[in-house]
Image (tube, rainbow, N blue to C red):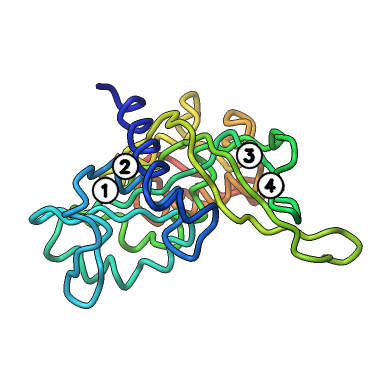
């Protein structure tokens, strides 16, 4: 069974249990989190295991898996407590293609609408920056998971002149691909492959076809991890970078 099939099985398993019977967006565990937990550990006996002051999403002997869909900064204390004694994998799902449906007042659903935004691995960089002081720990692995999903939303009043919206639930439909980051040099995979030996953020923007803010955040992350070095500035006051030996 390949990864896509195992993920589909996890989706079916979660959606066919009490999680589905209680309805979309219950106060309990969200579907996206539950599916990834089941995907990485099918046996619920290893789920939600108390470990010191915290509850690990998955724990098997000396290995912990944490699923964090957003706000990696919230995990800093938890990770700092786990890492001295456990090998920790942090899984961060990134929605790639999203199909949006509104939950109507009568409980029905609107027609499906595809979101114009397509998620990518680079979207995780701001989240990674928030835990950059932990990313060099040899006990830590980060897995970025691109996943297609169905988003269900409800109206939440007005924001200015516009109708507000709140995401009620996100249900994964397919695992697209994953990026595994086990050491600082793995993060160089975010850079375009054809950079010159000495480069600036402008080169990263142009060759990587990315927004300037994304390139700036990425280079800050790589510099913090020590995998790129700064060589001063050019005549336009851009930092000059080189990949560390």
Front disc: 4 or 3: 3
Q: Which residue is mark 2?
A: 181
Q: Which residue is mark 3?
A: 202
Residue closer to the observer: 17 or 54: 17
Q: Quadrant of residue 160?
A: bottom right
Q: Secondary structure at mark 3?
A: helix
Q: Is residue 237 left or right of residue 220?
A: right
Front disc: 2 or 3: 2
Q: Could you classify mark 4 by the number of other residues whose Cα lies within 10 Å: few (under 14), some (14-19), or many (20 or more)?
A: few
Q: Earlier in the sequence, mark 4 or mark 3?
A: 3
Q: Residue at x 69, y 33 (%)?
A: 114
Q: CA distance from mark 2 to mark 1?
A: 6 Å
Front disc: 1 or 3: 1
Q: Could you classify mark 3 by the number of other residues whose Cα lies within 10 Å: few (under 14), some (14-19), or many (20 or more)?
A: some
Q: Disc 4 vs disc 3: Cβ atoms closer than 8 Å?
A: yes
Residue 2 placed where, x, y %? 28, 22
Residue 120 placed where, x, y %? 54, 36
The label on residue 194 is none
Q: CA distance from mark 4 to mark 3?
A: 10 Å
When the figure is inspected, residue 200 is found, relative to residue 197, above or below; the finding is: below
Q: Residue at x 65, y 45 (%)?
A: 212
Q: Earlier in the sequence, mark 2 or mark 1?
A: 1
Q: Earlier in the sequence, mark 4 or mark 2?
A: 2
Q: CA distance from mark 1 to mark 4?
A: 37 Å
Q: CA distance from mark 2 to mark 3?
A: 25 Å
Residue 148 placed where, x, y %? 52, 34
Q: Earlier in the sequence, mark 1 or mark 3?
A: 1
Q: Residue at x 12, y 53 (%)?
A: 60
């Amino acid at each position: 069974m390949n990864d896509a099939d195992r993920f589909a099985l996890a989706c079916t398993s979660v959606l066919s249990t009490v999680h589905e019977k209680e309805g979309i967006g219950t106060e309990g565990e969200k579907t996206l989190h539950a599916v990834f937990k089941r995907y990485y550990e099918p046996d619920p006996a290893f789920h939600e295991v108390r470990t010191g002051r915290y509850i690990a999403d998955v724990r098997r002997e000396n290995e912990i898996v944490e699923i964090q869909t957003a706000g990696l900064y919230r995990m800093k204390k938890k990770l700092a407590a786990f890492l001295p004694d456990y090998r920790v994998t942090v899984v961060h799902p990134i929605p790639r293609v999203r199909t949006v449906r509104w939950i109507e007042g009568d409980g029905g659903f609107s027609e499906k609408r595809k979101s114009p935004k397509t998620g990518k691995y680079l979207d995780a960089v701001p989240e990674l920056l928030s835990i950059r002081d932990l990313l060099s720990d040899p006990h830590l692995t980060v897995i970025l998971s691109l996943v297609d999903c169905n988003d269900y939303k409800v109206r939440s009043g007005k924001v200015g002149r516009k109708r507000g919206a709140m995401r009620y639930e996100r249900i994964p439909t397919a695992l697209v691909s994953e990026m595994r980051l086990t050491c600082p040099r793995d993060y160089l995979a975010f850079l375009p492959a054809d950079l010159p030996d000495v480069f600036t953020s402008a080169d990263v923007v142009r060759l990587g076809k990315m927004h300037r803010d994304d390139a700036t955040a990425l280079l800050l992350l790589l510099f913090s991890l020590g995998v790129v070095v700064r060589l001063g500035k050019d005549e336009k006051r851009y930092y000059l970078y080189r990949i560390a030996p």
